[in-house]
Image (cartoon, rainbow, N blue to C red):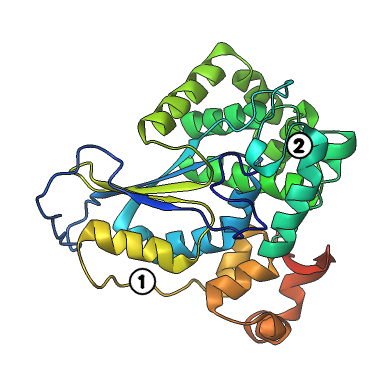
Amino acid sequence: MGNGDKRMINDNPMICDLETGICGTAGEEELEIIDFNHPQKSIEVYYVTDPICSHCWALEPVLRRFKEQYGHYFNFHTVMGGLLEKWSDEPVDPRNGISGPADVFGHWREVGEYSRMPIDGSLMLDNPVQSSFPPSRVFKVIQKIYNDELAYDYLRRSREALFAFNRNIADETIMIDILNQLGLDGEAIVQDAEQQTGQQLLNKDFSLARSLGVRGFPTIIIMNEENKGMKITGSRPLESYVEGLKQILNTEEILPKKQPSLSNLLEKEKLLFSKEIEVMYDIEKSEIKAFMERELSPSSYQAKELLGESYFTTTKS
């Protein structure tokens, strides 16, 4: 579900309007050029999202590369946006013709086919997610108790479970299982998330998203220390985010870090779809098999297929 998407997928796939100057008061003064030899980062990047946002799933390959190669320029913050509190008689996403769970199936499939980040979606016909708030609350509790990185791992595993493997990530047993696989105490965290504190943490994110002027997901906001920002809405190519970062830094050139080795990336991520590897390393789909064989030892990974797309899992524990 791409709640608040600017255009329907058929009209202009995965592209939404770009708006600038929405974060704070935009004056006439020039933006400051930052000396990045100094250890303190002065740029804040806010990623406003939701566990069941299909366009956010489509953005995963680009967002990972942006963080890996340009993350030394900014502090990254993931903000839960609250896409679906519950289904009601009112249309949830009229722009995309979504009034109830069954309407989601076709929309998700279309996003998956266009982006090549596979989405099954059939659970929305027979065991639909009733609310995105439960996994969002779990995310916030992990973030509070542990750290942002572990919370982000949970978000990723949840999206894999939902979109690729058709599991209801708002179901308590599924949430507990995902948490346990991350080496956490699933029952304890889910219990904490369902307490009043879990919703209070979530409400803070909702307030932040409103203050940032967010109306749809995914939204990336790049902001400098003078509270001047750029808002980039929708799933876009890497160049859009790099250009936004340049503008906020007021520079014509920024230096990316080298991409991580595929072996390190797969070991960290555990599972990668072909599209994610293609985007990270600038290779074509037709080159993926040879690239994997060249970069990895045969015993270190398994190649599998889902909905016509290849994906790869590490064999390392």
Look at label 1 and name its amino acid. Pro
Which residue is pictured at 61% across the width and 29% down the height? 138
Q: Which residue, as the protein is rendered here, is positioned at the far left?
A: 29
Which residue is pictured at 47% across the width and 27% down the height? 206
Q: Nearer the viewer, residue 66 or 242?
A: 242
Q: Which residue, as the protein is rendered here, is positioned at the far front?
A: 11
* Neighbourhood count class around disc 1 (C-alpha, 10 Å): few under 14, some 14–19, many 20 upward: some
Q: Please give the label number shown on residue 256.
A: 1
Q: Please give the label number shown on residue 177.
A: 2
Q: Nearer the viewer, residue 314 or 218?
A: 218
Q: Disc 2 vs disc 1: which is toward the camera?
A: 1
Can see residue 149? Answer: yes
Q: Is residue 110 above or below residue 82?
A: below
Residue 249 image offset from top left, x and y in percent: 23, 59
Which residue is pictured at 54% across the width and 43% down the height? 217
Instruction: Count how many numbered circles sit on residues in the image.
Output: 2
Lateral position of residue 154 relative to residue 309, left or right = left
Secondary element under disc 2, as helix, strand or loop, is helix
Residue 38 image offset from top left, x and y in percent: 17, 58
Look at label 2 and name its amino acid. Asp
Q: Is residue 195 above or below residue 62?
A: above
Q: Quadrant of the N terminus?
A: top right
Secondary element under disc 1, as helix, strand or loop, is loop
> Distance from label 2 to label 1 (Cα)?
37 Å
